[in-house]
Image (spheres, rainbow, N blue to C red):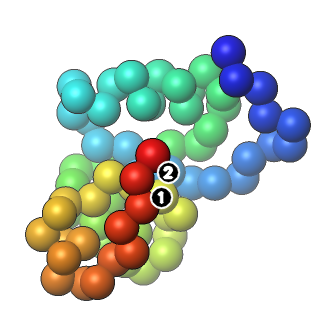
Amino acid sequence: MLKFQKKVNMKIGHINYLNLLPFYQFLKKNNIFMIKGVPSNINQLYKKRKIEAAFISSIRAKNNNVLMRGL
């Protein structure tokens, strides 16, 4: 298991989709704070910078020139 040297104080958007479960299990094991919501809510939180990272819709990303970064 990956160990963080410093405590991470990020807020990450959590959408309850089955294909994202492995990613969220990793975050949960490493005590990373997640904010749950539906996609439209998570998109708004990300846009308002209330959360630092999230899986947002590709349409929202394209329309708002979101920087594309992969894991």
Crowd around label 2: few <14 · some 14–19 · many ≥20 (10 Å): many
The three-letter code of the residue at mark 1 reads Ala
Task: Give the answer, above or below, for where 7 lies relative to 40.
Answer: above
Q: Secondary structure at mark 1?
A: loop
Q: Are marks 2 and 1 in contact (CB under 8 Å)?
A: yes
Residue 66 found in image quarter: bottom left
Q: Residue furthest bottom?
A: 64
Q: Secondary structure at mark 2?
A: strand
Image quadrant containing the N terminus: top right
Residue 24 found in image quarter: top left
Along the viewing direction, whichever of 60 and 39 lies nearer the viewer: 60
Q: Position of residue 7 (x, y in %)?
A: 81, 43
Task: Give the answer, above or below, for where 46 lies relative to 71.
Answer: below
Residue drawn at (24%, 72%), measured in percent from left and top?
A: 61
The three-letter code of the residue at mark 2 reads Ile
Task: Give the answer, above or below, for where 6 lies relative to 49.
Answer: above
Residue drawn at (50%, 63%), measured in percent from left and top?
A: 51
Residue drawn at (53%, 63%), measured in percent from left and top?
A: 52
Task: Please report whichever mark, 2 or 1, sits nearer to the chain's N-terminal start.
Answer: 2
Q: Is residue 2 visible?
A: yes
Q: Position of residue 69 (x, y in %)?
A: 42, 61
Position of residue 46 in the picture relative to residue 50 (left or right): left
Position of residue 67 in the picture relative to residue 64 (left or right): right
Q: Position of residue 28 (x, y in %)?
A: 55, 26
Residue 56 found in image quarter: bottom left
Crowd around label 1: few <14 · some 14–19 · many ≥20 (10 Å): some
The label shown at residue 12 is: 2
Q: Is residue 35 visible?
A: no
Q: CA distance from mark 2 to mark 1?
A: 5 Å
Q: Residue furthest left?
A: 59
Q: Which residue is mark 1?
A: 53
